[in-house]
Image: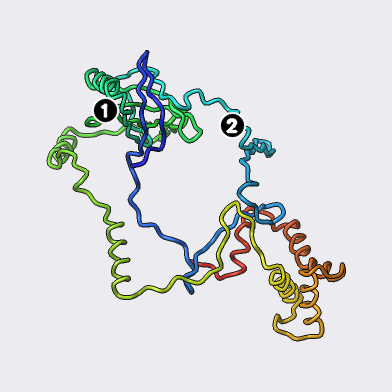
Amino acid sequence: MRAIWKGAVAFGLVNVPVKLYAATGEHEVRLHQVHREDGGRIRYKKVCSVDGEPVEWGDIAKGYETDSGELVVLTDEDFERLPLSTEREIEVLEFVPAEQVDPLLLQKTYYLEPDKTAAKPYALLRGALEQTDRMAVVKVALRQRESMAVLRVRDKVIVLQTLLWPDEVRAADFPILDAEVTVRPQELTMASSLVESLAADFDPSQYTDAYVTALEELIEQKVSSGETRAPAAAEDEPEEGAGEVVDLLAALQRSVEKARSARGEGVGETSGDAPAATKGAGKAARGGSAADDDEARAPKQRSRAKAASGDGDDDGAKAPAKRTRKKAS
């Protein structure tokens, strides 16, 4: 395992340097969205809903919408100025009886490994938790967010489990539960008898995920029977944050063809203006005349005008993908 956080547990005057490891991991079969006809991967581009243009990762910020509909833009610098007093410290606030911690509050679980020089204070804290049958309520900052958590002992390891904040737990408001219900003693006795007949010690290893097992068997069956296809040939896509490398001549040519198609002209027609359009695109790529540049830019300007006139909603971000290939179901 690889440590995801390093810091120290501080309780009283005792300081225990520790490393944090994720104690759990989801077991799932990773599937991709692909085009059913040719197996091509379905990609999603980050597109601005205002101008319809792709946005690079470095130009993206976080925003908060007020009740009145106004937008507050928060930058990385804004987040860096926010206080995180427990950034590298697991601060013990109090020790509470273990039965008082509602399991509904429990979130993600982590293992705490002591530093080589902290074996004794680690054992001291572990022993105190076991002997008193209590959990330590702590505060810790993980992934730029302050969380409430508890420390408890599992075997020989001190476990940190993050908790939901109290206002993140919804109240169960079901009026039907307040209705008067009559349960006869015989019925309660029978229900209790059923519980006793199924009573056992909890052993999670005896249970398996039948769906994932069946899915893995299905995939293996298709591989064994040769129901596979070679990876679809696709253009290399730039990584997030990298500028797109575009063949200007090809891009202009596609724009001209798209504009002609919008006017009802066939893409493959060889009318008198076809060579001129191609030449105009070539001149624009090589630094041609202003008239040629205007002709080459016209389709793009019309496309932007269309986006500004009403195609700028949230669903517009997916429009380019839908126009270039058939929808994958």
Q: Which mark is residue 153?
A: 1
- Residue located 74% across and 63% down the image: 303
Other-residue count near label 1 (Cα within 10 Å), few / some / many at <14 / 14–19 / ≥20: some
Amino acid at dot 1: Val
Give the colour scheme of this rendering: rainbow
Front position in the image: 308 or 258: 258
- Residue located 31% across and 23% down the image: 135
First reached walking from the N terminus: tag 2 or tag 1: 2
Most extreme residue toward the front, as rendered?
117
Amino acid at dot 2: Glu
SS class of the residue under badge 1? Answer: strand
Front position in the image: 273 or 293: 293
Please name which of the two marks, 2 or 1, marks the residue nearer to the observer: 2
Most extreme residue toward the top, as rendered?
13
Other-residue count near label 2 (Cα within 10 Å), few / some / many at <14 / 14–19 / ≥20: few
Q: Position of residue 212 (x, y in %)?
A: 31, 57
Q: Quadrant of residue 305?
A: bottom right
Q: Left of 53 or right of it: where is 145?
A: left
Find disc 2 in the rendering and name its residue: 80
Tell me: residue 55, above or below residue 327.
Answer: above
Front position in the image: 113 or 176: 113
SS class of the residue under badge 2? Answer: helix
- Residue located 22% across and 19% down the image: 131
- Quadrant, the N terminus: top left
What's the distance in space between the residues labelled 2 and 1, CA to CA? 34 Å
